[in-house]
Image: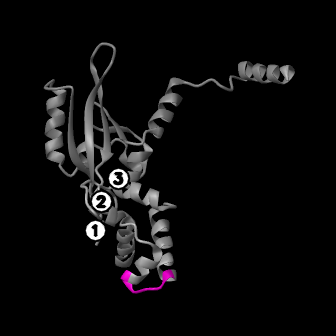
Amino acid sequence: YLVWMGGIWYAIVRYQFLKISPAVVSECIIAGIDESFLLLDNEFNIVRVNRATEGLLKVSRKSLMDRPFPEIIVESSSIADELGRMRSGAFDSFSCRMHYRAAKGSPVLIDTKLKIVRDASLDMIGILVIGREVKGPSRFRERYRLSAREADVINLMVQGRSRNEIAGILSVSGETVKTHCTAVYNKLGINNKIQLIHLLKEYNLISEQQAEATAVLLK
């Protein structure tokens, strides 16, 4: 065992197997951020993005690089004005909700924070843009494309109805309900009712008000 460990240690030292540069570490961190991440230069051009941003906008990183940030924002004029004020020293950071232009589908509403990045001399070297998608019913419908019947099944499942009860309410067989449930789970990428509830809450589709029953209106 000691000989084996010694051989591994020698290989690590001799061939620098575990030598990791700060650049590699920063890339790994950026790639792993769940929120949308963009880094802008002093001219507000995009110089770094992460996978979350690519996924939201349905574009490749290459197509975003070096583009002026306001170009990908619906409220481009207003954002350009605020960025200009930030650069002139009015404030170091600001937050707002803005719509990112997606390559496919409707614009994506993002709750965003923009902050100046400074070097050791406190000179501005860029702007960090971090945002999280504001999910809602329309975004849910657009993303998952559920049929009217599947929407009915989800609503009844959330109300705690059994398969037989759902079948009776919708005037279909139990096997048909099972088929709809399977289709819903496959479309949503989930495996059970707990995950369904969690996903619906993410999109603000479940009321937080206390009542005898809860309805999820997806149609």
Asked whether residue 6 is in view, the answer is yes
User: Which contiguous range is marked in magenta?
Assistant: 169-174
Q: State left or right for residue 6 relative to residue 110.
A: right
At mark 1, the secondary structure is loop
Asked whether residue 180 is in view, the answer is no
Tell me how the rendering is colored. Answer: one colour
Q: State left or right for residue 162 relative to residue 135.
A: right
Q: Rounded to the nearest whole Å, what is the CA distance between mark 2 and mark 1?
A: 8 Å
Judging by the rendered image, the residue that carries numbered circle 1 is 217
Mark 2 touching mark 1, by CB under 8 A? yes
Judging by the rendered image, the residue that carries numbered circle 2 is 205
Marked residue nearer the N-terminal end (2 or 1)? 2
At mark 3, the secondary structure is helix
Q: Relative to residue 210, is residue 41 depicted above or below?
A: above
Measured from the top left, where is residue 15 in percent x and y?
Answer: 72, 23
Quarter of the image with the C terminus in it: bottom left
- The residue lying toward the viewer, choosing from 68 and 56, is 56
Label 1 CA crowd tier, 10 Å (few <14, some 14–19, many 20+)? few
Amino acid type at image mark 3: Glu
- The residue lying toward the viewer, choosing from 52 and 164, is 164
Amino acid type at image mark 1: Leu
Measured from the top left, where is residue 81 in percent x and y?
Answer: 13, 38
Residue drawn at (20%, 41%), measured in percent from left and top? 96
Label 3 CA crowd tier, 10 Å (few <14, some 14–19, many 20+)? some
Residue drawn at (26%, 34%), measured in percent from left and top? 114
Quarter of the image with the N terminus in it: top right
Q: State left or right for residue 7 relative to residue 202.
A: right
Amino acid type at image mark 2: Leu
Residue drawn at (24%, 55%), measured in percent from left and top? 209
Mark 1 touching mark 3, by CB under 8 A? no
Q: Is residue 175 magenta?
A: no
Q: Say the numbered circle drawn on residue 202.
A: 3
